[in-house]
Image (cartoon, rainbow, N blue to C red):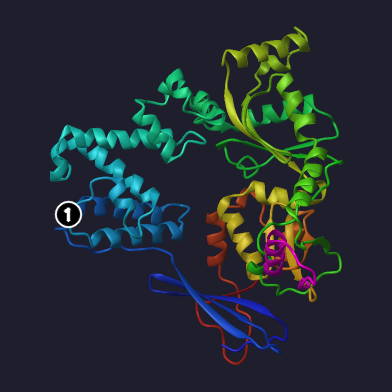
């Protein structure tokens, strides 16, 4: 393949060969000093992997193969998940001993926590249906079933926000036998404030959030804070989903304009795109910690999120508990307003008192909620990041990296290194602490970030060379469909494009 472009160019070709979908990515800089081609492959679908029927883990292998085929044949096939199944199956097929728990599986190279959980669930269900004799011979007893039940409870406890493996193990050792037991004062003492809140509202937050519930919360917020605020529902709701796992809210205010500078190492970004005239500059020269803390505190003090949003909504009986709070993001629990909250028959004061009473008695419907305070000038980047889904965001950010840029919830950035940024050595004697600071400064990259695009989603997507995608289509299924859609190949020299090939400029 010949590429005769005068400027840097990224060309992606796709060729389907048998069961493999190979994507050839070439990045060529003519007139420069580099010319490189990178190859990678993504398997689009898989056939059943062969293994010995006499394997000590034959039943587990059959279960994983079945799960893999379900993923392959599903409407939103994820090739990375298929690859994870394949890797795990090949690893387990090599074993000459029986897997007895997810702990045994997690220790294997190529088996992640998710597949290990599937194995544990399978062993437990099999033991219940076929009896202890279905377990490995070394553990064919009630003790083995009890161990599996303990592992299931441990995972159940870990579903509570803030409870990890260590804390779940401590709770089990203390005698906790269910999520409901966490209300016991003996176990409450072992939990942090955020963990107690997660346990207290666990039965509510495990339920999906209906669209009308998210709309009722957003409507209540608009009616009970300053009209200068803009309130928008994002996340799964904006993607058109019927239900969501929580309520994601974006808040905008004319006074909130501070844009945090990216904190990632600039060395991770390759600057390959020429600067634009409307780029906004943010210095990244090394600073002393004290000055950085003072700057952060100043920015936090100007954020209206806590004083002008959270506090009024607490006093009016909408917010029930705080999981985490900061100047840019608040996470917690909300009481979903009902029809009585919109009625003026008994007056606003009575309605507020009734809501506060319901919260105190844990009556009503509660959901997880995130309030995101977004700078006005970065609204487009925030909508892009907080709408999702995760696969679409990963795709967009990976595209930015390929262009030598950095995309986050505050905008599309480019790093510009200073040519004369090397610190000068001191002529006078310095202390050990000053010498250490000088050494750190010498190692840090010196330069500044440029904010290229942030105000609209369309601008960011267009700068990345991507086609704009409506929020309802931002998912892995749509991305995969677009990549498979045949388009006319770009002429790159003599001859004609290969059959079934796809060329796409990024």
User: Which residue is located at x 44 percent, y 24 percent?
Assistant: 187
Residue 161 in sight = yes
Part of the protein shown in magenta: 422-443
| The N terminus - image quarter | bottom right
| The C terminus - image quarter | bottom right
Q: Where 194 sits versus 18, above or below? A: above
User: Which residue is located at x 83 percent, y 39 percent?
Assistant: 302
Residue 468 in sight = no
Q: Which residue in the protein does label 1 denote?
A: 56
Which of the pair 225/308 is nearer the observer? 308
Report x, y in % for residue 425. 76, 73
Is residue 144 highlighted in magenta? no
- Label 1: which secondary element: loop
User: Which residue is located at x 78 percent, y 9 percent?
Assistant: 347
Report x, y in % for residue 309. 76, 30
Report x, y in % for residue 3. 63, 87
Is residue 428 toward the left or the right of residue 108 in the image? right
Q: Crowding at label 1, few (<14), some or many (≥20) Cα neighbours within 10 Å?
A: some
Residue at the front extreme of this rendering: 429
Is residue 423 highlighted in magenta? yes
User: Which residue is located at x 58 percent, y 83 percent?
Assistant: 36
Q: Where 204 sits versus 55, above or below? A: above
Report x, y in % for residue 83. 40, 61
Which of the pair 436/98 is nearer the observer? 436
């Amino acid at each position: 393949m010949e590429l005769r472009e005068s400027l840097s160019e990224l060309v992606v070709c796709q060729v389907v060969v048998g069961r493999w979908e190979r994507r050839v990515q070439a990045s060529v800089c003519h007139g420069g000093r580099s010319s490189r081609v990178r190859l990678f492959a993504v398997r689009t679908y898989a056939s059943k992997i062969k293994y010995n029927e006499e394997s000590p883990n034959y039943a587990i292998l059959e279960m994983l193969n079945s799960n893999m085929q379900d993923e392959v044949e599903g409407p939103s096939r994820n090739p990375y998940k298929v690859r994870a199944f394949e890797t795990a199956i090949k690893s387990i097929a090599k074993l000459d001993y029986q897997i007895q728990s997810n702990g045994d599986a997690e220790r294997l190279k190529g088996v992640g926590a998710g597949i290990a959980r599937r194995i544990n669930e399978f062993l437990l269900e099999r033991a219940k249906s076929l009896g202890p004799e279905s377990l490995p011979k070394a553990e064919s007893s009630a003790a083995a079933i009890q161990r599996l039940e303990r592992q299931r409870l441990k995972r159940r406890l870990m579903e509570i926000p803030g409870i990890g493996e260590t804390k779940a193990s401590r709770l089990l050792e203390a005698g906790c036998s269910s999520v409901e037991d966490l209300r016991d004062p003996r176990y409450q003492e072992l939990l942090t404030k955020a963990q107690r809140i997660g346990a207290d509202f666990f039965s509510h937050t495990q339920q999906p959030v209906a669209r009308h519930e998210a709309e009722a919360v957003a409507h209540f917020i608009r009616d009970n804070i300053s009209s200068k605020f803009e309130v928008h529902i994002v996340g799964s709701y904006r993607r058109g989903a019927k239900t969501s796992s929580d309520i994601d809210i974006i808040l905008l205010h004319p006074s909130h304009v501070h844009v945090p500078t990216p904190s990632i190492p600039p060395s991770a970004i390759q600057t390959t795109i020429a600067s634009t005239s409307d780029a906004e500059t943010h210095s990244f020269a090394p600073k002393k910690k004290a000055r950085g803390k003072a700057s952060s505190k100043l920015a936090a003090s100007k954020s209206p999120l806590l004083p002008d949003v959270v506090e009024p909504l607490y006093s009016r009986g909408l917010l029930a508990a705080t999981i985490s709070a900061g100047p840019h993001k608040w996470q917690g629990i909300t009481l979903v307003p009902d029809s009585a909250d919109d009625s003026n028959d008994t007056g606003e004061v009575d309605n507020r008192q009734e809501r506060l009473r319901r919260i105190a008695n844990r009556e009503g419907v509660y959901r997880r909620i995130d309030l995101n305070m977004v700078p006005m000038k970065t609204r487009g980047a925030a909508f892009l990041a907080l709408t999702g889904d995760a696969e679409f965001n990963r795709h967009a950010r990976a595209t930015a990296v390929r262009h030598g840029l950095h995309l986050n919830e505050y905008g599309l950035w480019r790093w510009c290194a200073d040519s004369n940024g090397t610190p000068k050595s001191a002529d006078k004697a310095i202390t050990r602490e000053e010498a250490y600071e000088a050494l750190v400064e010498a190692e840090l990259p010196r330069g500044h970030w440029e904010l290229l695009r942030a105000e609209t989603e369309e601008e960011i997507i267009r700068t990345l060379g991507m086609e704009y995608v409506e929020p309802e289509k931002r998912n892995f299924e749509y991305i995969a469909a677009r990549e498979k859609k045949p388009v006319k190949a770009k002429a790159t020299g003599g001859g004609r494009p290969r059959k079934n090939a796809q060329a796409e400029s990024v």
